[in-house]
Amino acid sequence: PNTLLANTGTTIFTVMSALAVEHGAVNLGQGFPDADGPADVVRAAADALLDGRNQYPPLTGVPELRAAVAAANRRFWGIEADPATEVVVTSGATEAITACLMAVLDPGDEVVLIEPLYDTYLPVVRMLGAVPKLVRLEPPKWELPRAALAAAFGPRTKALLMNSPQNPCAKVFTAAELAFLADLLQKHDAYAICDEVYEHLTFDGWRHIPLMSLPGMRERCMRIGSAGKTFSLTGWKVGYVTAPARLAGVVAKAHQLLTFTTPPNLQRAVALGLAKPDAYFAELAAELQGKRDRLSAGLARLGFGVLETRGSYFVSADFRPLGFAGDDVAFCRWLTETAKVAAIPVSAFYADAATAPRHYVRFAFCKHNSTLDLALARLEAAL
Ligand code: PMP
Ligand code: GLN
């Protein structure tokens, strides 16, 4: 078998979800909501199924969804995109990330990545024969390490792969940080692949800013969104890429090889979702902010060193104040097996766990309040 794939472990999200089931643990590990998204969106998918929308849709996505993605780009971020040539619908952001990497990388090209990072990035970069250049955000503030970033860019840099709002550290990149990245991209004539699946999930007045909306970035950026996160329907796997036409055309070629198309009924329903009024998006964020507050306050009460969460589904917490003897993997195992609450060790988001921070644990708060309360009660009883 292929050496890289054979040596790729089962994703930590699957490992922890299986362990959660085995031990009857409350699952605050894998980031999925425990309630379905908007009923009208789900109904639209069901109706489309019964409506004869069951054959191959167009390669780059059904026209309604491409138009809805373009309209959402304009409404939320002031980005103009031609739905016919600059939007590609994919089977989830996961496929979009791979398709964008395939679209720009040749073997030997360098890709700048920012740790902690989502678990599909590195294996795909390596599978394509490209060379990862890793730069680390340092806890607890996760600020952009400017000197290290400047040093990571060089004559062989082809692309930056970034994620904001960021999983797992819940960082939302600031305008100044994005301007710094834009400057590097321009200086080194590189592309940016922007994983923005949590674009609508920001809190406390923090607002997501797409790198693509900065001066000079429209032609360099491939911006990725996900219906899974925007409509709390993570199993649907409908993603979308917005990119300049010359890049979108190549992303479409990658999509042609990977999955060719994405289920048309789901696409139609997501188009309806993206046309929802601003209030839907604001309420989604407000509701999640309340859940973040509930979980963060509860963890702090129990003695965790809770880090700031500006966006996403996740709160990370330092468990050293609890006096646990062991690293984050051991702590998560103990949490799941003994406290019966599953979470994710933050070192799973690093290329080399041995040199990663080993005292943070990531909890997902995209759950019913009763689920969060049950988890907190179990933690209290076990600690
Ligand atoms: N990127 C990030 C940062 C994520 O957290 C996730 C998973 N939720 C994805 C991509 C994958 O999104 P999708 O389920 O749309 O493939
Ligand atoms: N994105 C989700 C998380 O970070 C998990 C997605 C998956 O299971 N691959 O928890």
Image: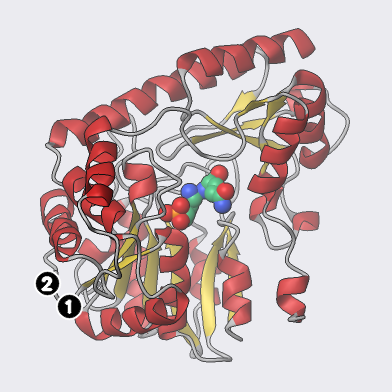
Q: Are marks 2 and 1 in contact (CB under 8 Å)?
A: yes
- At horizontal 58% and vertical 91% (from top left) the residue drawn is 108
Dividing the picture into quarters, in which one does residue 114 lie?
bottom right
**Percent position of residue 180, x then y:** 36, 65
Q: Which amino acid does the dot numbered 2 rest on?
A: Asp
Q: In this view, does 85 lie to the left or right of 337?
A: left
Name the image quarter holding residue 2: bottom right
How many numbered dots are placed on residues in this image?
Answer: 2
User: Residue beneath label 1, please?
Assistant: 85
Quadrant of image for the C terminus = top right
Taking depth in this image into account, of 356 and 194 the one nearest to the observer is: 194
Residue 255 visible in this rendered orientation of the protein: yes
Q: In this view, does 284 lie above or below 249?
A: above
Q: Position of residue 243 (x, y in %)?
A: 26, 73
Camera-nearest residue between 47 and 100: 47
Q: Does the residue labelled 2 lie within 8 Å of ligand 1?
A: no
In this view, 117 is above or below 58: above
* Label 1 Cα neighbours within 10 Å, binned few <14 / some 14-19 / many ≥20: some
Q: What residue is drawn where x is 40% and y is 62%? A: 91
As helix, strand or loop, the secondary structure at mark 1 comes to loop
Q: Mark 2 points at which residue?
A: 82
- The residue under the point 19% across, 59% down is 65
For mark 2, does the 10 Å Cα neighbourhood hold few (<14), some (14 to 19), or many (20 or more) residues?
some
Q: Is mark 2 on a helix, strand or loop?
A: loop
Question: What whole-number distance in Å separates the C-alpha atoms at marks 2 and 1?
Answer: 6 Å
Which quadrant: the N terminus? bottom right
| Residue 207 position within the rendered picture, expressed as x and y whole percent measured from the top left | 27, 42
Which residue type carries mark 1? Thr
Look at 77% across and 56% down and name the residue there.
355
**Residue 168 visible in rendering:** no
